[in-house]
Image: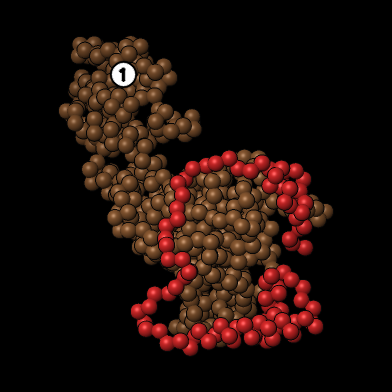
Chain colours: A red, B brown
Amino acid sequence: MSNLAQDVAKLARIDLPDDEAEATQANLEKVLNYVQQLESVQLPDDIEPFFGAIESVNAIRVDQTQPSFAREEILSNAPDSDGQFYKVPQVFE
Amino acid sequence: MSQTQEATETTQSQRDAVTDADVTLIVGLEVHVQLDTQSKLFCNCSTAYGADANTQTCPVCTGMPGTLPVINEQALKLAIKTGLALNCEIANYTKWDRKNYFYPDLPKGYQISQFDKPICGAGHLTIADPKGAFETRAIQIERAHLEEDAGKSIHDESGAKKPTKIDLNRTGTPLLEIVTKPDLRSAEEAKAFLTELKLILTYIGVSDCNMQEGSLRCDGNVNLHINVDGQKVATPIVEIKNLNSFRAAERAIGYEAERQLRVWKKDGLGIGEAPKQTRGWDVANQKTTPSREKEGAADYRYFPDPDLIAVVTTDQEIAAIGATIAHLPSALRTDLMENYGLEAYDTEVIVSQGAGVVAYYESVADFLTKSASGSKSPGKTASNWVAQEVLRYLNEQSCEVGDYPVSGEQLGELLVRISKGDFDQTRGKDVLAQMVENALDLDAAIEKLGIKAVDANEIQSLCQQLIDENPAVIEQIREGKGKAIGSLIGKARKLNPNINPNVVKENLLKQIGI
């Protein structure tokens, strides 16, 4: 867990200064250690894994199209666009 | 891929001694198929290809906070149908997971996919080579899962570091990712697998499989198992991305096999001693090149998507979907070979064209078989005509068999007339051309060409004329040069296009006295 905070920061594309990294690391470790108590619970072998808090299933819709949003409206949420496309900085250097 | 064996230390002289016979190519494929739905996987936006950029999006597929995805019923059905056609176990319980990564064409910051409970489990697809280059083999399928597509990035290639442009129309389009076990042993087998998979998907109508439009995309995992003095050494696995044609897949895998052997002979690095690499296929230079991508292994941090609940499908529902699969190519091949006596090659020509051509062929062959025409091999005759005449027309006109102007029964009737000796094959093709070009029925086409049965007396006098006018040729025939008779038949055809060459030949020989 030595670089946990920096690893998570990297995955989240966040710059984490060294002075904050230490405290963040300690916090994350505390959270993980707390949750890890669950692993000590002994379960019978035939228990199915639990994937979510909602027990209902099959929320399904019919395959039908509806009008999409106007491009102008959708692109108005973008930091930058040319009226047709979203514009983003180049990913590769 | 699941190779986990430790690499074995090898010396340069051991590596130099390795020959092609010591090397086994190991290939697994991941194929993304766009399912043929009207709307996207989790929202009602259209999936139609070719619309103006960013005109088919909404708050759900652009990942706005507070929106909720709802699964498309048709996408589920098409996924199950595909799984059944690939002999997969279908899950009664399937769920959705988030695959987390940042990329500008993935607006939510995660892709909704399936991790540990995919809709389709283990299955297999059988590949064969009609030319016999490899053995018929069942290629194991590991799983097939549903997921949403990402958007499209248009990178600036000018070098001016202009912004990348993003079109999110494709975002949320339903994909089925089909993953094979590392079962394929050659580039040819990989191509055969893709060809057969595409054929099956087309037959069952789950995807248009249009590779230009990205409806079928393929990645390959490739490495080598090398026998070094009885020890198996594996080379590092390379993933080749975006093989966007079957030809590219075949070439790239073949190239990669050679490259890995070359590199290993030099550096001796085995699996686990070098990181898994991603490479792309460079069509222009016909080689694989390392992909531009971030360093470090991907960490997708899958977890169950809390916005979606599980889907439960009963065995009855699965069976009902299975009942919508009419014919699979493998069953049709068996039918054509057993019921019509076709060889594997001729069968493939028909079956590879799709269910419509198979049905057309069957109507021609059935008509010819049922009529008491005396045709010795009606199945083969029908396949010759369908393969040469009908398919050529469809190819030239770029149209479907449903657009072919002559019905299967009419073509069958034409073949009956030829078989009965009303006219010969060459004349028969003229008749068919009339039927196609002028939309005539069989009798009208025959009448238009002025074809009438030539009676025995006419043939006798025609033969006598040929004998009288061509003493040199007759001499050759008498000397045993059987082929010389061909020139007489050509002359006979010029004198009367309606004669049956076989009848003329028989009469000529009789009148010459052979």
Location of residue B442 (image quadrant): top left
- Position of residue B18 relative to residue B351, above or below, is below
User: Left or right of B254: which side holds B420?
Assistant: left
- Label 1 sits on what residue type? Leu
Q: Residue B279's x, y, as percent?
A: 62, 64
- Identified at 50% across, 54% down, the residue is B70
- Position of residue A87 relative to residue A53, above or below, is above
Q: Name the foreground residue: B340 vs A83.
A: A83
User: Left or right of B513: which side holds B299?
Assistant: right
Q: Name the foreground residue: B76 vs B496.
A: B76
- Position of residue A58 relative to residue B344, above or below, is below
Q: Residue B1's x, y, as percent?
A: 49, 71
Quadrant location of the C terminus of chain B in the rendered image: top left
How many badges with numbers are in the image? 1
Identify the subunit bearing mark 1.
B
Seen as rendered, the residue at the extreme left is B372
Q: Residue B472's x, y, as percent?
A: 33, 21
Under circle 1, the secondary element is helix
- Identified at 39% across, 45% down, the residue is B203
Residue B426 in view (yes/no): no
List the residue tagged with mark 1. B442
- Identified at 28% across, 44% down, the residue is B336
Q: Name the foreground residue: B5 vs A17.
A: A17
Residue B275 in view (yes/no): yes
Q: Residues within 10 Å of mark 1 (few under 14, many from 20)?
A: some
Q: Name the foreground residue: B514 vs B427.
A: B427
- Identified at 77% across, 51% down, the residue is A80
